[in-house]
Image (cartoon, helix red, strand yellow):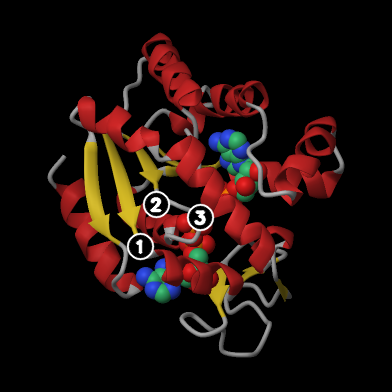
Amino acid sequence: MLIILLGPPGAGKGTQAEKIIQKFSLVYISTGDILRKAVKEGSALGRKAREYMDQGQLVPDNLVVEIVRGRLMEPDCANGALLDGFPRTVDQAVFLEQALPDIDKKVDRVLLIEVDENELIERLTGRRVCGDCGANYHVKYKSPKVRNVCDQCGGDLYQRDDDTLATVTERLEVYKRQTESLVEFYQERGLLSSINGNQDIDGVFDQISSVLEDL
Ligand code: ADP
Ligand code: AMP
């Protein structure tokens, strides 16, 4: 099973992904997480990606496409994967469509998580992430038991560099300009399911679960 999570930054894709991969035994592939790790490690990829990410811009397609191609070919993806944050441009989606038959895969469903814009800004600027295990929190909506400490591994929580108000505004614009057209792309292929992301985390997950259980 290959599932794509689509939606603006802050819609709750990473939050839902944690729950989806557990329930449906999928391998999680987040291009944002892979790029942030590369930046942290200072690898060649990270050095190229950093300037784009800091400005809230998309990293060039050719870099991202190579990451995803390599990852999907790894043996642990044989039984299914959940893509979060990829594709983000029509060119990336076309690449995926053309590359999948060669590795005996196809996209089974695209889950579009829709959330009002004011709420997105609130979610992104309040997001906190564990520096050790990557778990996701929110200062108001999903606070850890101990302030700034991860419930799962005890690591320190931090605010992503691109979650400041100025960069968040730019990322939402970039979504509208470069990513939103994927809604039509996948609608035309009969693959899109709209999920109401303006609900609490469990409410959103219930709706996603019923879509995936029907596949
Ligand atoms: P994305 O991966 O789409 O950018 P995240 O999953 O990181 O979004 O969610 C952004 C922020 O919003 C996080 O701080 C998360 O804890 C919070 N959040 C996610 N889903 C909800 C929800 N349904 N209601 C309230 N807050 C949420
Ligand atoms: P995310 O964690 O999905 O919010 O992504 C964080 C940042 O990583 C984005 O703002 C982009 O700069 C970069 N990025 C992640 N995925 C992609 C992608 N598929 N294409 C281009 N850039 C990406």
Disc 3 versus disc 2: distance between alpha carbons? 20 Å
In this rendering, the answer to whether 2 lies above or below 99 is below
Tell me, for residue 21, which label it has, or none. 2
Q: In what element is the residue under mark 1?
A: loop
Locate residue 189 relative to residue 11 in the image: left or right.
Answer: left
| Residue on which the image places disc 3 | 9
Give the residue number, with chain letter if any, for mark 1: 115
Q: Residues within 10 Å of mark 3 (few under 14, many from 20)?
A: many
Residue 34 lies, in percent from the top left, at: 65, 42
Image quarter (top left, top right, bottom left or bottom right) of the N terminus: top left
Q: Residue at x 43, y 55 (%)?
A: 13
Q: Amino acid at mark 3?
A: Pro
Is disc 1 surrounded by few (<14), some (14 to 19) or many (20+) residues within 10 Å? Answer: some
Amino acid, disc 1: Val
Q: Any atom of ligand 1 within 8 Å of the CB at mark 1?
A: yes
Please state the horizontal and vertical placement of residue 87, each as a whole percent of the image: 47, 33
Closer to the chain start, of discs 1 and 3, is 3
User: In the rendered picture of this protein, how many numbered marks are placed on residues?
Assistant: 3
Given residues 192 and 69, the one toward you in this image is 192
Q: Secondary structure at mark 2?
A: helix
Question: Is residue 141 shown above or below 76?
Answer: below
> Residue 124 or 102: which is nearer the viewer?
124
Residue 160 is situated, as x and y percent measured from the top left of the image, at: 69, 63
